[in-house]
Amino acid sequence: MTYRVCFVCTGNICRSPMAESVFRARVAEAGLEDLVVVDSAGTDGWHEGEPADPRTVSVLAEHGYDSEHTARRFLPSWFARLDLVIALDTGHLRALRHLAPTEEDARKIRLLRSYDPGAGPDLDVPDPYYGGRDGFEECLEMVEAASTGLLAAVQDELEGRAA
């Protein structure tokens, strides 16, 4: 059975496509691409149909990640097909919990940095959109750090399903 993960930020052009690309690479490195489907969306539809921010694309490419992406808005109906919904900050977490049709769906929502044991108390991935390139680099570092723990959690879930 396929395990489905969706990363969610505000407009789906900076943080969530970055997280999607990094995690998809981690899934492929682990040989799980046939078992895990990774995508992303935004809580708002401001950028629907647009590619990822050019700074996101540039930073991803420089670090060896694929960046093919088209922005879209997260819909409440998606909860039924998703196993895990990953919010990039606490604002997204609140918005997604508000959209969740059931308590079971709300339990599928997690903050990305909750999977990084070195994250400290602030689990938000800051929005790099209004800043310079260094914000995108910082975002990538946070995403990469959390992706290791997230992959381990997904692998545990897959093993639990197989048992």
Image (cartoon, grey):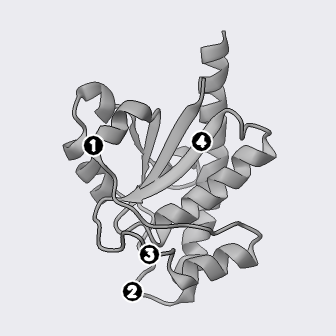
CB-based contact (under 8 Å), mark 2 and mark 4: no
In space, the residues marked 1 and 3 are separated at their CA atoms by 21 Å
- Residue extending furthest toward the top: 163
Q: Mark 4 points at which residue?
A: 37
Q: Name the residue under label 3.
A: 50
Q: Mark 1 points at which residue?
A: 76
Give the label, 1 or 3, closer to the camera.
3
Mark 2 belongs to which amino acid? Answer: Tyr
- Residue extending furthest toward the front: 49
Is 62 placed above or below 161 here?
below
For label 4, the crowd category at 10 Å Cα-Cα, with few meaning under 14, some 14 to 19 and many 20 or more, is some
In space, the residues marked 3 and 4 are separated at their CA atoms by 21 Å
Quarter of the image where the N terminus is located: top right
Residue 122 is at least partly visible in this image: no
Mark 4 belongs to which amino acid? Answer: Val
Q: Nearer the viewer, residue 47 or 118?
A: 47
In space, the residues marked 2 and 4 are separated at their CA atoms by 30 Å
Q: Helix or strand or loop: what does disc 3 sit on?
A: loop
Q: Which of 58 and 45 is in front in this view?
A: 45
Image position, residue 152 (x, y; %) = 66, 36
In space, the residues marked 1 and 4 are separated at their CA atoms by 18 Å
Q: Which of the 4 image quadrants contains residue 65?
A: bottom right
For label 1, the crowd category at 10 Å Cα-Cα, with few meaning under 14, some 14 to 19 and many 20 or more, is some
Mark 1 belongs to which amino acid? Answer: Pro
Point out the tag, 2 or 1, that comes first from the N-terminus. Answer: 1
Q: Helix or strand or loop: what does disc 4 sit on?
A: strand
Res 130 label: 2
Give the label, 2 or 4, closer to the camera.
4
Point out the tag, 2 or 4, that comes first from the N-terminus. Answer: 4
Point out the tag, 3 or 2, that comes first from the N-terminus. Answer: 3
Q: Helix or strand or loop: what does disc 2 sit on?
A: loop
